[in-house]
Amino acid sequence: MAGVAVVLTAPRARGLTDAEIAVAARAADGDGPRRLGPAAAEIAAGTAPDLAALAAALPGVDVNAVPLTGRRKRILIADMDSTLIPVECIDEIADVAGVKPQVAAITERAMAGEIDFEGSLRARVRLLAGLPEAALARVHAERVSLNPGASALVRTMRAAGARTLLVSGGFTYFAERVAEAAGFSEARANVLLARDGLLTGEVAEPILGREAKLDALREAAAALGVGAEAVLAVGDGANDLAMIEAAGLGVGFRPKPALAARSDAVICHAGLDALLALQGYSEDEIVGL
């Protein structure tokens, strides 16, 4: 199948050099690289490049190979914590509650796929019992921000007619606000329960986890009358694995090893707007840069 190699760098201040593009072009046996912007280029690939070798040869550069067929996706489904935003909200809530080491240790194991997500979430939320519900506002205001390129990714795909969903194993308090800031059309997440202004240490059932993310992908595709090949999914941890594997383009963003090994593309250096370059968008098509 015909494909392209997409070469990307991180901060726009760094940029992508002609020499780096040439190295990737030789590895892909490709001609006529096309710049998509200062930090992105694509190369019509004659052969599948050795991505591991290129990663070693081009430090600070992401190189991925994607097929040309159906390259621009009709649906974007994205994880929130450590994907759209740089933090795990539950760990930050736990910090305010004075139990961050205990909660973060469970989070790390869950995202690595070492323990069951649903059970791990219940265990972490139990440790938050008694915390004033008002602490959520403090966490959001002081610790939650969009990762670079998040708004450009969402708003550009939405402007192009794509359906955009934030589907998080985190909490609605944050997901709704992050979705609004980034421009998503809808958001789904778990509900932290509170009574008399205090967290109860419980989360509403059923818990939105790995399978619920996959269900959301399938529902969105069915609603548009398209197959999973029309979906772009992005996440970072084991909880995202099912939707990443099902999507036509499953992207691991700063992924844990369990996810990186099974993603169609991996972004370790560039921002989330790199997902637009994977689809062939050039800089002049991007909304909100």
Image (cartoon, rainbow, N blue to C red):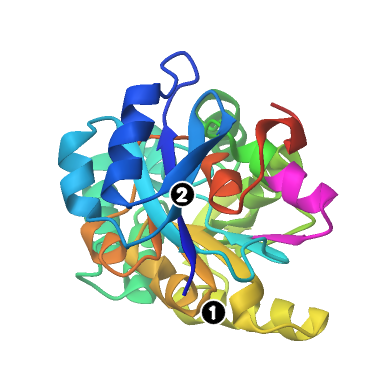
Q: Amino acid at mark 2?
A: Gly
How crowded pointer 2 is (Cα within 10 Å; few <14, some 14-19, many 20+) is rated as some
- Secondary structure under badge 1? helix
Marks 2 and 1 sit apart, C-alpha to C-alpha, by 33 Å
The reply to whether residue 121 is in sight is: yes
Magenta span: 154-166
Question: Residue 249: horizontal and vertical position, in percent?
Answer: 51, 66
Q: Nearer the viewer, mark 2 or mark 1?
A: 1
Q: On screen, 15 above or below 98? A: above
For the residue pair 1 and 176, the one nearer the viewer reads as: 1
Mark 1 surroundings within 10 Å by alpha-carbon count, few (fewer than 14), some (14 through 19), many (20 or more): many
Task: Name the residue rendered at 45%, 22% in the picture.
Answer: 11
Residue at 31% from the left image edge and 64% from the top image edge: 259
Q: Residue at x 32, y 68 (%)?
A: 120
Asked whether residue 268 is drawn in magenta, I would say: no
Q: Position of residue 107 (x, y in %)?
A: 30, 55
Q: Nearer the viewer, residue 127 or 79?
A: 79
Q: Is residue 225 left or right of residue 78?
A: right
Which residue is at the far top?
13
Residue 235: x %, y % from top left: 45, 57
Label 2 residue SS = loop
Residue at the extreme front: 31
Left or right for 97, reference 75 = left
User: Which residue lies under the disc numbered 1?
Assistant: 214
Q: Which residue is mark 2?
A: 130
Kindly identify the residue that appears in the image at 58 percent across and 64 percent down: 232
Q: Quadrant of the C terminus?
A: top right
Indicate which disc, 2 or 1, sits on the residue closer to the N terminus.
2
